[in-house]
Image (tube, grey):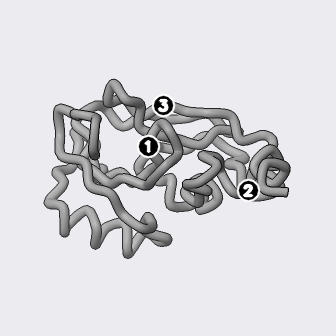
């Protein structure tokens, strides 16, 4: 990504995989290893500025994230969570592992111009 240097390769994508099958295919394509629990380290999330979607093999431990949150990759190379309780739909209702974010597509659809999640009420208000 221009202007940001991560200690691992990060690739801009137009959209993230929408199913386990396509997630696994992207993981294979990027040659992402599996962690000690046998989970793929492939991730696809928005960047911190919400200006684009990025995919990468995450070298850190795959985390369990709280319900009511979406994920993004921080500028300092950590997957972090942000509240999505103002989403009109699609905010995770139960805890989930970061490499299963594909189950919550609203967390992966952003408005790159206004830097927000499209499902967020605040994003809708920004557009009108």
Where disc 3 sits, the SS reads: strand
Of badges 2 and 3, the one in the foreground is 2
Q: x, y (%) of residue 95? A: 61, 40
Task: Indicate which disc, 2 or 1, sits on the residue closer to the N terminus.
Answer: 1
Q: Which residue is mark 2?
A: 119
C-alpha gap between disc 2 and disc 3: 19 Å
C-alpha gap between disc 2 and disc 1: 17 Å
- Front residue of this view, candidates 25 and 78: 78
- Which of the 4 quarters of the picture holds residue 127? bottom right
Q: x, y (%) of residue 24? A: 31, 67
Q: Which residue is mark 3?
A: 80
Task: Indicate which disc, 2 or 3, sits on the residue closer to the N terminus.
Answer: 3
> How many numbered badges does the structure rendering display?
3
CB contact under 8 Å: marks 2 and 1: no
- Front residue of this view, candidates 59 and 94: 59
Q: Residues within 10 Å of mark 2 (few under 14, many from 20)?
A: many
C-alpha gap between disc 3 and disc 1: 10 Å
Residue, x 50% and y 38% (percent of image)? 49
**Disc on res. 111:** none
Q: Is residue 128 left or right of residue 98?
A: right
CB contact under 8 Å: marks 2 and 3: no
Q: Which residue is mark 1?
A: 47
Residue, x 44% and y 43% (percent of image)? 47
Where disc 1 sits, the SS reads: loop
């Amino acid at each position: 990504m221009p202007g940001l240097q991560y200690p691992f390769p990060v690739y801009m994508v137009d959209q993230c995989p929408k199913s386990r099958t396509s997630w696994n295919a992207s993981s294979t394509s990027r040659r992402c290893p599996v962690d000690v629990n046998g989970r793929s380290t492939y991730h696809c999330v928005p960047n911190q500025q919400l200006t684009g979607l990025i995919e990468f093999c995450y070298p850190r431990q795959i985390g369990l994230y709280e319900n009511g949150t979406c994920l993004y990759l921080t500028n300092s190379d950590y997957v972090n969570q942000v509240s999505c309780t103002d989403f009109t739909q699609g905010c995770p209702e139960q805890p989930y592992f970061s490499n299963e974010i594909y189950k919550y597509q609203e967390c992966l659809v952003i408005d790159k111009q206004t830097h927000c999640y499209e499902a967020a009420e605040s994003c809708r208000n920004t557009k009108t």
